[in-house]
Each structure stands twice: as C-alpha cells, then as structure tokens.
Amino acid sequence: MTKKSKLKLGNGNRCERLHALAISETGFIFDPQTGQSFTVNQTGLFVLNGFKKGKDSETVSHDLADACSVPIELAQSSVEAFILQLERYL
C-alpha cells in the first residue's frame, strides 16, 4: 500500500499557489508570490503540469508510467518524492 502525501494539491492555498506558478517548457518555475524560482527536470515538469490540470497523484503516477513505459511502482515513488520536494516550496 502506498502512503498518501499530506500535500493537498486539489484545494486550498497550495492549489492557488500551484496554479499561480509560471512554468516554462524547459522546466524553469517562477513563483510570483514569493519571487522564488527553481528548475525541474522533464519528470518534474510532467508531474507539475498534471497537477495544474487538476489531476491527483494517482492519476499523474499512472500517466507517468504510461508515458515513460516504466512500472507503476516506480512512477508512484517518483511522484511521491517530487511531492515531498514540492511541499518545501508551496
């Protein structure tokens, strides 16, 4: 069983912050609320774009597994690890 992250991307302040992020096609991220910027790799970009579309972590994990032809367990652990990092910024 996969442990669910406490990050709530579908509602509240974090959802608003997530949707306010400026995300370039190359993975450069700018948070206009804080002025912080950071970069993500192609996997992070894929995950962030899924969240911005309103998808939950389970759906994003399945999409990632399909897109990259990797086992769902690997995709799920990658998405969860990314969420833990994202919590530091949002």
Image: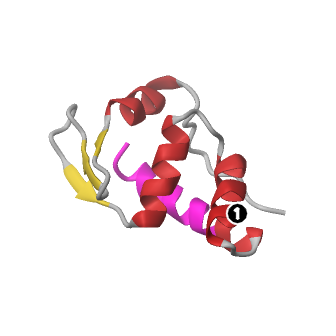
Instruction: Determine whether 17 is above or below 40 in the image.
Output: above
Q: In terms of secondary structure, where does tag 1 sit?
A: helix
Identify which residue, 4 or 59, lies in the foreground.
59
Residue type, label 1: Asp
Q: Which residues are magenta?
A: 77-90
Whether residue 55 appears in magenta in the rendering, the answer is no
Instruction: Determine whether 64 is above or below 50 in the image.
Output: below
The residue positioned farthest toward the left in the image shown:
35
Residue appearing at x 73%, y 58% in the figure = 3
Query: Viewed as shown, does residue 38 lie left or right of 11?
Result: left
Whether residue 78 appears in magenta in the rendering, the answer is yes
Question: On the image, numbered disc 1 is attached to which residue?
Answer: 66
Residue appearing at x 24%, y 56% in the figure = 38
In the picture, which quadrant includes the C terminus? top left
Location of residue 84 in the rendering, given as x and y in whole percent from the top left corner: 50, 58
Q: Main secondary structure of the magenta part?
A: helix
Residue appearing at x 47%, y 30% in the figure = 15
Dot 1, crowdedness within 10 Å: few (<14), some or many (≥20)?
few
Location of residue 68 in the rendering, given as x and y in whole percent from the top left corner: 62, 70
Instruction: Determine whether 7 is above or below 82 in the image.
Output: above
Query: Viewed as shown, does residue 33 lie left or right of 63?
Result: left
Residue 42 location, quadrant: bottom left
